Each structure stands twice: as structure tokens, then as C-alpha cells.
Image: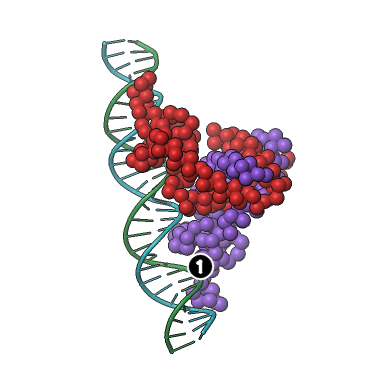
Chain colours: A red, B purple, C cyan, D green
Amino acid sequence: MTDETLHVLAGRYRESLRRAVYLIRSLDAEGELSTGQVSTLNIVAEGSVRVSEIARKAGVRVPSATEQIIRLENAGLVKRTQDVKDARAVLVSLTAAGRDALEAANHVRNALLGAGLATLTPAEQDAIAHAIPAMNKLNAAMTG
Amino acid sequence: MTDETLHVLAGRYRESLRRAVYLIRSLDAEGELSTGQVSTLNIVAEGSVRVSEIARKAGVRVPSATEQIIRLENAGLVKRTQDVKDARAVLVSLTAAGRDALEAANHVRNALLGAGLATLTPAEQDAIAHAIPAMNKLNAAMTG
DNA sequence: CTGTCATATTTAGGTAGCCTAATAGTTAGT
DNA sequence: ACTAACTATTAGGCTACCTAAATATGACAG
């Protein structure tokens, strides 16, 4: 594609993502956990993670991650432990309650979004499914 | 697709959108206008719009839209006028400065995102281009 | 082994942006 | 004309983000 074409595509894609953000937010309306909390839990679910690693993956600064984690810890959803190999570092992991809460939150959101996807034609569903790997590659390329 | 398949697709799509939020945010790092401000300006750019209409399109409550608009008005980017046909309503429109600022902001963001898109293969670019109408339909279906 | 610089996290203080509830004015239906 | 519905704003509060500074540990050169 030419730069011009890519520029136009960028504009359309940006607009679509902007609206998709509100879609994602609307999925949270019913739930008990906020979008940010679910995002953080999803990151922690991958295993014991340092605070700085959570911040990096979430695209926020370290103090913001600390704040989120403290809130989640107070809610009993994650626990913090000292890294035995590096006393400066803190490892964050899910509690059993956190795992349950995350699973429930994901289930509700996926069901809602799945119902929305069901209103699309099979071709439209395929178009989205097919775009996801490209979107992920783009996300990775641009946000590190 | 089966409900189960759609459920899985919903999960993958949600995850991709979650990361795309940070991509969008990263496009704002350099600019003077926040993501929310650009979104609001983009809505207002479509013509004179009521506060309640802006709120609906932006996916926020009316007082939040009022707040945004007051900020943009203080920055000289939009102006508020009474609707002559309905004295309850306020019509919001861009000022010349607002139009310029929006154009500049969109240009910078589209250039940055366009550069990211340029790193994808043509097939990946096509996959995203092809998914956008479906994404827009889904957004419209789920957020009204 | 000690001083220095880098790394990891937390604390402190501030801002943007979202929310609900309450207020004031306008319109529309009976 | 009265009541109910609608439009916008104001008031008060919360979450989540930020930068700067403090605290503690690690790594390493001399």
C-alpha cells in the first residue's frame, strides 16, 4: 500500500478502535471488576510477575501498577511475595479468589461480546477473526 | 459459528482490543490533546451537536460530556450556542482553532499509526482493512 | 570491601475524566 | 394549566493515571 493509503487506513482503524473502546467499557457495566482490574489480573494470571513487568505489559508507569496491585490485594485477589533471588523485587500472583473472579469476569464479558458477534454474518465474523493476528502484531510492534 | 466458537473468538478479540487501547494511548504521548479530547472534537466535527448527543456517541454520561466541552471551550476549540428551536438544548460546534487543532492531531496520529501499519505484510494490512466494517457494525450493534 | 551508580518498589501530591444526585429551565401531552 | 419528560449544569466523590522523591537492594570498579 502507498503511504497515502496507509494514512487513510490508519484513520479508519483509529476511529473503529475508538468506538471499540466504548464497547469494551460497556461490557464492564454489570461486573464488579473494572476494565483495568481485569486487565491487570489477566497479566498476573500468566504467572508470578514483577510489578515493573506488570506496568510494562499494561502500558502504564510503575506507580500506577503498584496502586492497582494494592487495590487488588486489599480485595484479596492477588498476593505479593518477595523475590528470593532479588530482595528489591516483588512477585505478584493470583490468589484462588482472584482466579475465580477473573474467570467469572472473563466469562461474562466473553458471553456478552459473543452474543454481539453472533449478530454478524459469518463473513463478518471471519473478517474479525482473520484480523486479530495482524492487530496483535501491530500492537506488539508499536507498544513494545 | 457455534456459541462456543464465538465465545473463544470474543475472548481473543477482547484481548486484542485491550492492547489496542494502549496503542491508541501511545499515539497521544506527543500531542497536546488527550485521547478523550480528540474523540470529542471528532464527534463535534460532524456538525453542530447537542451535549446529550455527544455524550451518547462518546459513550459517557451527560455531565461528563459537559465537563469535556467546558474544557475544550476554555481552550478555545469549541463554542456553545443556544438551539433556537429548543431553548433547553445547547449546540456545540468547532471553532476555526478547533478545526485546525483536530486536523493537526489526526494527522500526527494517522502518520504514526500508518508507519506501524507499514511494518505489516500486505496480507495483514488487508486483513485489518477488511475487518473494519465488521468492527464498526459490531460497535454499532452493541453500543447503540 | 567500599563507594558509586543502577534497579525495584513505594509514597506523596496532583490532575483528568468518569460517575450519581440534585438543581434549574424548557417542552409536550392531557 | 399542570404534570411529566427532557436538557444541561453544578456539586461532590472516586478511580486511575502521572511525576518527583524516598527507601532499599544489587552490581561492580577500584
For the residue pair A32 and D6, the one nearer the viewer reads as: A32
Q: Which residue is mark 1?
A: B80
Residue B83, relative to residue D19: is it above or below? below
Q: Residues within 10 Å of mark 1 (few under 14, many from 20)?
A: some
Q: Residue at x 72, y 46 (%)?
A: A123
Residue B110, relative to residue C20: is it above or below? above
Q: Residue at x 43, y 28 (%)?
A: A48
Q: Quadrant of the C terminus of chain A?
A: top right
Query: Does the rendering let one see residue B20?
Result: no
The image shows residue D23 at horizontal and vertical percentages of 27, 30
Residue A84, relative to residue A118: is it above or below? above
Q: Residue at x 44, y 41 (%)?
A: A101
Query: Does the rendering let one see residue A83?
Result: yes
SS state under label 1: strand
**Res. D30 image quadrant:** top left
Residue B27 shown left or right of residue D11 in the figure: right
* Dot 1 amino acid type: Arg
Residue A47, relative to residue B74: is it above or below? above
For the residue pair B34 and A87, the one nearer the viewer reads as: A87
The image shows residue B37 at horizontal and vertical percentages of 51, 54
The image shows residue A126 at horizontal and vertical percentages of 69, 43
